[in-house]
Image (cartoon, rainbow, N blue to C red):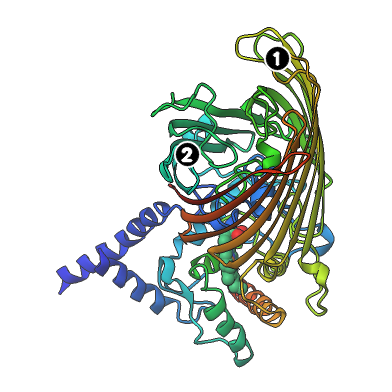
């Protein structure tokens, strides 16, 4: 009996140790991004309001850490709540301890640093290697295909993605294309742009984006970003979509010039969220073999909805008002550049001005995007001045948490060709699991010259994408 | 190992019989024990058990309430946060929650917050 008692005592004494070890192995607060895709995406990779805020803040949740003094929280975070009962008691305590070990400064505005594993934290290392893969398979059915290959399975891509933030100070983003196949055609595929590419059966692997951003320089709202990345122009990066094809405004090209609004460039950019709802960015781009730098700027403002730091709007819960569900974002941007062809020293001087409007109302979202441009020598020889006018208007509706329907209209008038293109693109995206989605898209395209319709084109696209 | 945990749970629940807020289960089965809740909190408990489980388990709600820290974003989870989280839910597409549901659930979460700091 006594032996039995001793054993019991031993077990009871040992239990907390077992328990604590178990609790610290639960990664409840270890990973900054320990949450589901839908925290930041509608259906990935399209961002929702929180995803936007998270991106604009360099991958840090930046809601106010503390309540204003006059509305002292009923349960101040520094107070240690006594939690009793069964269940995983150690986990809440661990969370609390982690949070309290962060700074206690009353004026602290940004989220606390998570100092779970000190050596890793000191080294600035993320607790988990932030690497992921994204695979894309597209199929196109075109009954009028010129080469009679009606069903084309050939667009495949595999990319390595990485992103994160070191100690809330330096954020980074990397996209490396491991494999891409199929000609890159912005109108019909979302194969990642591969600059050294060509269309071979395995276009060379290439870095698409590598960028570092130093957040909150001298404790100001200004972030400085350097590397190879997509300059902040349109409200949406071209990947910020659920359809297979990209917005024409983001991807159209003029003549032989490779410039698109969404092309990754070697650049340095300063950007900042100002006063919670205004976002500004400006930068310069360095092009090889060219002395003069290119310049760009972006300004956008959001009215209603979650602010750009991810904070909820004030809503009167007793009185319904339609503005409770409405969020409108307006953007304007410009790019002034000069580029040359692969093998010529002829230069093309160009500019783009654009404007975007994003309207969100409950499950409905509407995106409008318009760009005007001018190129003075887009084929690097004939000095044919070319104006371009491109428009895209998309209405989308979230039918369910994992089902989204959209229809887009595009207008593309690139003076160079004398042809005006109209496109109508309905699509449905379904994500049976949050990281796996399938998109069915139909494209109707009509090309007119000044006299008549010169061509129509219809395609059915099936896009499959998963990431992990 | 399971036996040890079981023993531990039995042990804890026995010593803390007087605790105000009880947590049952582990991981995604974590939940509040409604045994001692006043009758007027029943609707809140019911809404939580139906609507809040549509997208995720109650584990994160339990962690937020009992630790005072929202587990995903690391923000303080106080009475301001319950309101703001309620608004977020109201505005989230397809969260399927009415204004009344939200008010009920905010009241219920505030009640839980109060309970969690009671000695």
Pinpoint residue A378: horizontal percent, then vertical percent.
72, 21
Give the x, y percent position of residue A363: 67, 66
Residue linked to disc 1: A380
Look at the numbered discs 2 and 1 and tell me whether their residues touch, using CB distance below 8 Å. Answer: no
User: Going 66% across and 47% down the picture, which residue do you hit?
Assistant: A446
Residue A178, position as x, y percentages in the image: 42, 31
Q: Nearer the viewer, residue A252 or A168?
A: A252
Horizontal placement of A309 versus B4: left or right?
right
**Residue A14 point in image, percent of width and height:** 30, 59
A59, above or below A7, in the image: above
Residue B101 or residue A460, whichever sits in front: A460
Residue named by callout 2: A130
Residue A351 figure quarter: top right
| Dot 1: element | loop
Which residue is at the front of the view, A397 or A384?
A384
Q: Locate residue A387: give its quadrant.
A: top right
């Amino acid at each position: 009996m006594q032996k039995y008692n001793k054993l019991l005592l031993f077990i009871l004494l040992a239990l907390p140790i077992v328990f604590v070890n178990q609790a610290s192995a639960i990664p409840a607060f270890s990973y900054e991004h320990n949450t589901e895709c839908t925290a930041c995406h509608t259906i990935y990779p399209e961002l929702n309001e929180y995803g936007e805020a998270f991106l604009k803040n360099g991958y840090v949740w930046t809601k106010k850490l503390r309540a204003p003094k006059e509305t002292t929280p009923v349960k101040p975070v520094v107070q240690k709540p006594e939690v009793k009962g069964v269940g995983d008691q150690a986990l809440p305590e661990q969370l609390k301890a982690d949070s309290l070990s962060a700074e206690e400064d009353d004026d602290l505005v940004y989220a606390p640093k998570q100092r779970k594993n000190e050596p890793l934290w000191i080294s600035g290392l993320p607790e988990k290697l932030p690497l992921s893969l994204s695979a894309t398979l597209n199929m196109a059915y075109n009954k009028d295909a010129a080469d009679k290959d009606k069903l084309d399975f050939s667009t495949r891509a595999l990319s390595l993605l990485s992103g994160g933030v070191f100690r809330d100070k330096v954020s980074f983003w990397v996209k490396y294309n491991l494999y891409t196949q199929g000609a890159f055609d912005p109108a019909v595929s979302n194969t990642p742009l591969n600059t050294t590419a060509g269309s071979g059966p395995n276009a060379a692997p290439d870095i698409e984006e590598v960028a570092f951003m130093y957040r909150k320089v001298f404790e100001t709202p200004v972030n400085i970003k350097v590397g190879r990345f997509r300059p902040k122009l349109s409200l949406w990066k071209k990947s910020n979509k659920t359809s297979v094809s990209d917005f024409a405004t983001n991807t159209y090209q003029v003549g032989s010039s490779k410039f698109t609004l969404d092309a990754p460039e070697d650049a340095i950019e300063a950007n900042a969220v100002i006063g919670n709802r205004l976002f500004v960015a400006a930068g310069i781009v360095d092009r090889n073999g060219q002395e003069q730098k290119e310049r760009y700027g972006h300004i956008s403002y959001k009215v209603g909805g979650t602010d750009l730091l991810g904070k909820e709007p004030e809503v009167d819960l007793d009185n319904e008002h339609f503005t409770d569900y409405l969020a409108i974002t307006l953007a304007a941007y410009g790019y002034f550049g000069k580029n040359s062809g692969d093998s010529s020293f002829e230069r093309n001087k160009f500019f783009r001005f654009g404007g975007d409007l994003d309207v969100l109302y409950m499950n409905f979202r509407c995106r409008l995007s318009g760009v005007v441009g001018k190129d003075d020598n887009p084929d690097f020889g004939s000095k044919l001045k070319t104006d371009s006018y491109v428009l895209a208007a998309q209405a989308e509706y979230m039918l369910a948490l994992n089902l989204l329907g959209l229809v887009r209209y595009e207008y593309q008038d690139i003076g160079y060709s004398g042809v005006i293109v109209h496109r109508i693109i309905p699509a449905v995206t379904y994500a049976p699991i949050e990281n796996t989605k399938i998109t069915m898209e139909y494209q109707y395209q009509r090309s007119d010259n000044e006299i008549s319709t010169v061509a129509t084109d219809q395609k059915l696209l099936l896009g499959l994408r998963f990431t992990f | 190992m399971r036996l040890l945990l079981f023993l531990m749970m039995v042990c804890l629940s026995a010593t803390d019989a007087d605790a105000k807020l009880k947590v049952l289960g582990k991981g995604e089965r974590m939940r509040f024990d409604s045994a001692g809740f006043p009758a007027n909190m029943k609707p809140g408990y019911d809404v939580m058990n139906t609507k809040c489980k549509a997208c995720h388990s109650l584990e994160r709600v339990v962690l937020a309430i009992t630790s005072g820290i929202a587990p995903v974003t690391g923000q303080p989870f106080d009475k301001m946060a319950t309101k703001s989280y309620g608004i977020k839910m109201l505005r989230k597409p397809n969260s399927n929650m009415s204004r009344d549901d939200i008010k009920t659930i905010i009241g219920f979460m505030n009640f839980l917050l109060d309970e969690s700091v009671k000695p």
